[in-house]
Image: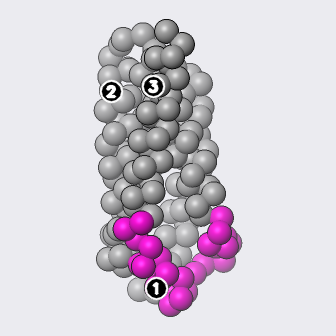
Amino acid sequence: MKWKKWMVYAAAIAGTEAVGALSGLLTREGMRAFNETAAQPPLSPPQAVFPVVWGTLYALMGIGAARVHLSPPSRARGWGLDLFVVQLVVNFFWSLLFFNARAYGFSVLWLILLWGLVAGMIGTFFKADQTAAWLQMPYLVWLTFAAYLAAGVWMLNG
């Protein structure tokens, strides 16, 4: 039984990290151009911070999803995992919209959608596994900060 649990955790973390890695790979050139040309708002962290933060957040997402998956079957478990997948897809496309398409205004709206999905996921996770829900709080806080950064970029770069 323990082996199965570890496999669920490993698969959830690896899958979530893979989504983030693929997004990063697909937006590498767009990020480079953005960093060279776009004006950024105050409090923008150095670029080296982003992979560390996102790597940690993806790991926490995966751990939370695994915990919910391993929780007793319930409506909250099903909805929580569905919301997890949907928010992960929305998360994936945000980088493409922001860095590659440079659709700054639309990406702010997309980020608000993502924030709402994550908040809903946290609420649903809370019903299935409270620890899983708490593990998502840094993600929600980071998305709030990311919304500030994205809105600032939009205002400064049109």
Please name the residue that numbered disc 1 is placed on. Answer: 33
Q: Amino acid at mark 1?
A: Ala
Residue most extreme to the bottom = 37
State yes or no: discs 2 and 1 in contact (Cβ < 8 Å). Answer: no
The kind of secondary structure element at disc 1 is helix
Q: CA distance from mark 2 to mark 3?
A: 18 Å
The kind of secondary structure element at disc 3 is helix
Image quarter hosting the C terminus:
bottom left
Q: Amino acid at mark 3?
A: Val
Q: Quadrant of residue 107?
A: bottom left
Please name the residue that numbered disc 2 is placed on. Answer: 79
Please name which of the two marks, 2 or 1, marks the residue nearer to the observer: 1
Please name which of the two marks, 2 or 3, marks the residue nearer to the observer: 3
Image-based side of 73 in relation to 42, left or right? left
Q: CA distance from mark 2 to mark 1?
A: 38 Å
Q: Residue at horizontal 35%, vertical 13%?
A: 74
Q: Residue at horizontal 32%, vertical 49%?
A: 89
Sequence-wise, the earlier of marks 2 and 1 is: 1
Please name the residue that numbered disc 3 is placed on. Answer: 8
The kind of secondary structure element at disc 2 is helix
